[in-house]
Amino acid sequence: MTKKMNVLVIGSGAREHALAWALSRSAVVETVHAAPGNPGMKDVAVIHPVQDTDLRSLLPIINRENIRMAVIGPEAPLTAGLADDLRAAGILAFGPGREGALLEGSKSHAKKFMDRHGIPTARWDLCTTAEEARSALDSRHAPFVVKADGLAAGKGVVVTQSREEALDAARGMLERGRHGEAGKKIVIEDGLAGDELTILALTDGTTYRLLSPSQDHKRAFDGDKGPNTGGMGAYSPVPWLGSELLEKICSRVLSPTVEGLKKDGIPYCGVIYAGLMIDGKGEPSVIEYNVRFGDPEAQVVLPVLEGDFAELLLACCESRLSEIKWKDPSRWAVDVVIASGGYPGHFEKGKKIEGLEKASELEDFVIFHGGTERSDDGCLVTSGGRVLSAVGLGNSLTDALKKAYEGVSLISFDGMHFRRDIGRKALL
Ligand code: AMP
Ligand code: GLY
């Protein structure tokens, strides 16, 4: 039996709330700490509202609270090398170091990696001038896909039917400084068609284990209409994903990714997030890698996980994931994201949130906070675009869906909006 440990979750969104929640249910965790955390986490974690998430800001907390393992939620501290810094300071860190995080931090790096290791992905060109972008677009047909090479808070990808719009997006990045440094180089690639799927794998750099497959809903409005968002909801597992396709995803994507990292000499402890497109013939291609849990995918994948989450992460940190027994999930989860009016465009903050207490009494329902804060008079108010993740659980997708929307119906704030069709595609 592992000695009980204190753990630290780094980040402040609904994904990090879900991480803290899952860790708090572990038999090997004494106390969960979160930095900077959010007000919704207070039932599962001790909150440390730090300004920055670099080693200097975190070390006092780590020392004072005797933290054994840190779990890094967002991509920015990972690409900044926080996991390397923590490990150098003798703390177990779940998350890849700077080099591994480049799979998300640079699209061209990820593309070269996939080409080098024979992992299927859209044909691509690297462009640094508008002239190169024009010629890359001329050699393709719609839909046109333009991507800032670096991190752009999920806003660096443009997919459009219009060549003019694609060229304008490319010029915006290359010539007008849109996305700053991140847009100084861009990737132009072939448009892929099919169904999108998220596969999250935990790895210690040698073996990997798949978490329950999930599907995000990127567009703001029902029927996949409207602008792209950070994700308006998700469900897990995915009923149309059979064992044959899953095996193909492992043999063509996940195994060569883990082996490729090894061949390249890059140690990797953390999540490999494969954003996949499955074409009409059932062939997978990688749209993108992320080096962390997805948001909102974590909010559905963690509640259906069988087994002890902290034990799993610890096994990754200690390079002994192969010892861990694995069970497929038996339950379903649906996350409906409740967003501020106007999101992903301009939205107002400070709207008073009602009904959370009532909702928390529901069985098989859990709320993760993404954009909330306490106002001066102690009320819980909105402070971000994606305010809450309302997660329903059940023994079928239908039950989980009903539960999620039952919970949503109890919650209200001025201007709130959410999609009413999360998971509906999967029922057809
Ligand atoms: P990302 O911000 O990298 O997650 O990309 C945002 C979204 O753009 C993806 O979830 C896809 O829906 C879409 N996308 C990215 N690359 C392609 C592609 N090559 N073909 C079609 N859609 C794409
Ligand atoms: N759900 C998409 C992401 O986490 O990047």
Image: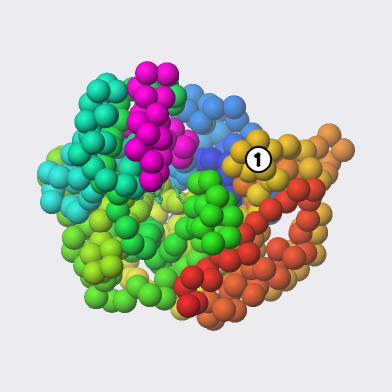
| Residue found at x 35% / y 31% | 167
| Residue found at x 69% / y 38% | 347
Residue 108 belongs to magenta span:
no
Q: Which residue is mark 1?
A: 384
Tell me residue 200's x, y (percent). Answer: 37, 57
In magenta, the rendered stretch is 148-176
Residue 201 as seen in the image, left or right of residue 343: left
SS under mark 1: loop
Tell me how the rendering is colored. Answer: rainbow
Instruction: Please say if 302 is above or below 341.
Output: below
From this viewpoint, which residue is outermost toward the right? 377
Q: Bin the neighbour count of mark 1 within 10 Å (Cα to Cα): few under 14, some 14-19, many 20 and up.
A: some
Viewer-side residue, 130 vs 72: 130
Instruction: Please say if 301 is above or below 51.
Output: below
Tell me residue 98's x, y (percent). Answer: 31, 33
Instruction: Please say if 423 is above or below 176.
Output: below
- Number of marks: 1
| Residue found at x 55% / y 58% | 233
Residue 79 as seen in the image, left or right of residue 416: left
